[in-house]
Image (cartoon, rainbow, N blue to C red):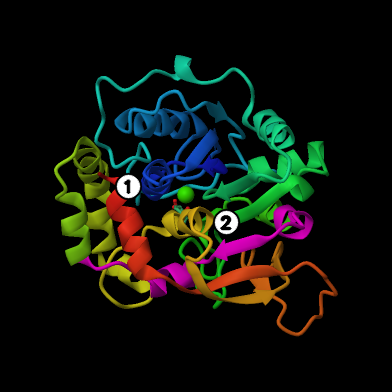
Amino acid sequence: SKKLLVDVDSGVDDAQAIMLALGAPDVTVLGVTCVHGNTTVENVCRNTLRVLKACNQLEIPVFKGADKPILGNMLDPGHFHGQDGLGDAPDPNAPGLDLLQKENAVSAMIRIVNENPGEVSLVATAPLTNLALAVRMDPSLPSKLRGLYIMGGNTESRGNTSVCGEFNFTADPEAAYIVLNEYQCPTYLACWEFTCHNKLSWEFCDTWLAQDSHKARFMSQIFQHSIEAAKTERFQKECVAGAGFISCDSYAMAAALDDSFIIESDCYPVSVELTGTHTRGMMVVDTVGFLKKTHKAFIMKKVDLERFKQMMMAALK
Ligand code: BDR
Ligand code: CA
C-alpha cells in the first residue's frame, strides 16, 4: 500500500485533499503535519482534527509545526476559507488540541521518512516552512522520499495573493526557494494557473455534496463559505475566467494517489523570486537553462479529470 505524509494548512481544500487520501483504497496516511497558512497553526491543527473526526480516523497522528514563515510574519490569509480557516461552521463537539502529538511536525516528518526510506510520498498543500526546516535538520531527507507533490507556485505570473504571487509560495518565499532547490527527488507541482484551467463544474459540486453520507454533510457545511467567495467578481478575476470551483490542494493529492493521474507535464528547473517590487514569491520556470540546475520538476499540465471526479466522489462516500 502507498505511504503518505501530508503537510497542510487546513483550509477547506486541504480538508478535501485529506479526505481524498482517506477515501482512496490501499493508502496509509502515516501522519498529518500542520503549518501556518490559511489560518493560525493552532486553528490548522484544530481543523485537521475535525476533518479526521468526520472521517472516523482520529487514530492518524497530527503534529503541530511552524507558526510563521522563515522570515517575517505570517501573511494575512484573507477570508476565503473563513476566519477559522474551515468555513466558519464551528462544531461544538470538535476534538480538543490535547489530541495533538507532543512531537513537533518537523521532527515527526524526519522520523517518519527515516523509518520508511524510499517509501513515503510527501504531499505539501501549504506554505513550505516545515519542509524547509526539515531539510536543514536532515539534508538526506529528500533522497529518502518516494516523491514530493506540491500545490503551489505559478507559471504565468498570475497571482492569487499578490500581483504575481500564489498563496503558498508568497506566504513563505524563502521556504519555497529552499524546497525547490534542495528536494532533489521526483517533484510534481500543481501550480495555481493549472488548477484554474481544471475547475470542476458547479453541477458536479451539487452532485458531490448531495451524497447521503456524514462526510458529504460535513463538507457541505465547511464548504459553503468558499462557495460564496468563489462566486464573487474579485475571485473570478483571480482564477482565470470560466465557471466552476477549484479544489487546489486535491490535484497534488490525486497525483500522489494515482500514478496515472498526470497525463502531461512540463519538466523544467524551477525556482522562486525572493526580491522584487511585485514579484516576491513568484515561481520562475527556467525553460532555457540559465540557472544551470540539474534537478527538474514536473509541472502538471493535463490530468485525468474523470478519474479526479471519481476520487472526489469516493472521498465523501
Ligand atoms: C493555496 O492557498 C490556500 O489558500 C489553499 O489551501 C491552497 O493550498 C492556493 O493558492
Ligand atoms: Ca492549502
Q: Secondary structure at mark 1?
A: helix
Residue 278 appearing in the image: no
Residue closer to the observer: 115 or 73: 115
Which of the 4 image quadrants contains residue 147? bottom right
Write down the region rendered in magenta: 178-202
Q: Position of residue 183 (x, y in %)?
A: 74, 54
Which of pointers 1 and 2 lies earlier in the amino acid sequence?
2
Which of the 4 image quadrants contains residue 64? top right
Q: Are marks 1 and 2 in contact (CB under 8 Å)?
A: no
Q: Tell me the distance, in whole angstroms, between the alpha carbons under discs 1 and 2.
A: 20 Å
Q: Is residue 224 above or below residue 160?
A: above
Which of the 4 image quadrants contains residue 43? top left
- Does the segment drawn in magenta span residue 180? yes
Q: Is mark 1 within 8 Å of ligand 2?
A: no
- Does the segment drawn in magenta span residue 117? no
Amino acid at the residue labelled 2: Ile
Judge the density around disc 1: few (<14), some (14-19), many (≥20) Cα neighbours within 10 Å.
many
The residue that mark 1 highlights is 315
Q: Secondary structure at mark 2?
A: strand
Taking 313 as reference, is 39 left or right? Answer: right
The residue that mark 2 highlights is 150
Q: Residue 38's mark?
A: none
Amino acid at the residue labelled 1: Ala
**Looking at the rendering, in which quadrant would you find the C terminus?**
top left
